[in-house]
Image (tube, rainbow, N blue to C red):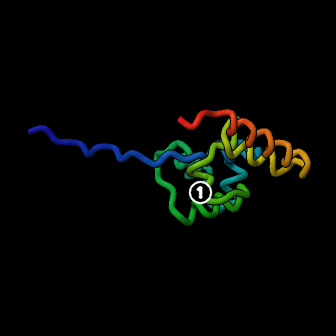
């Protein structure tokens, strides 16, 4: 009788590596910042081991973001809504008002179905 192997558990997608790269850290620096080994961080980034809530929170603090950002937002995707929001947040108030007016005008040009 053949031995059945356990199915590999699918890990939840995350953007820890992307956030590390976005902040300009190498694995050694980030691992030191959160008190883990580079090897363990590498395994987490490659989804070979799961992150814990504590490690997620420590990584988020070191990367100056929220824990949810690490599992929901790719900071390297410049066309995402979050990236646009981040860019607008840095803009002067006048530019934010202009952008809001443009978005409002674009939404009005659509059809109601």
Neighbor class of circle 1 (other Cα within 10 Å; few <14, some 14-19, many 20+) is few
* Secondary structure type for disc 1: helix
Residue 10 in picture, x, y percent from top left? 39, 45
Q: Nearer the viewer, residue 110 or 77?
A: 110
Quarter of the image with the N terminus in it = top left
Q: Which residue is mark 1?
A: 68
Residue 64's place in the image compared with 19, above or below, is: below
Residue lying farthest to the front in this orientation: 112
* Residue at horizontal 46 percent and vertical 48 percent from the top: 12
Q: Nearer the viewer, residue 69 or 17?
A: 69
* Residue at horizontal 18 percent and vertical 42 percent from the top: 4
Residue lying farthest to the left in this orientation: 1
Residue 21 in picture, x, y percent from top left? 71, 42
Position of 80 with respect to 9 (left or right) is right
* Residue at horizontal 69 percent and vertical 57 percent from the top: 65
* Residue at horizontal 84 percent and vertical 48 percent from the top: 96
Residue 9 in picture, x, y percent from top left? 36, 47
Q: Nearer the viewer, residue 73 or 27?
A: 73
Position of 112 with respect to 12 (left or right) is right
């Amino acid at each position: 009788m053949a031995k059945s192997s356990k199915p590999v558990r699918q890990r939840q997608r995350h953007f820890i590596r992307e956030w590390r790269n976005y902040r300009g850290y190498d694995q050694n620096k980030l691992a030191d910042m959160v008190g883990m080994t580079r090897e363990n961080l590498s395994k987490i980034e490659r989804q070979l081991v799961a992150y814990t809530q504590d490690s997620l929170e420590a990584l988020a603090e070191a990367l100056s973001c929220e824990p949810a950002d690490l599992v929901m937002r790719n900071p390297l995707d410049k066309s995402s809504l979050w990236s646009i929001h981040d860019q607008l947040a840095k803009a002067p108030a006048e530019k934010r008002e202009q952008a809001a007016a443009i978005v409002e005008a674009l939404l009005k040009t659509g059809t109601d179905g």
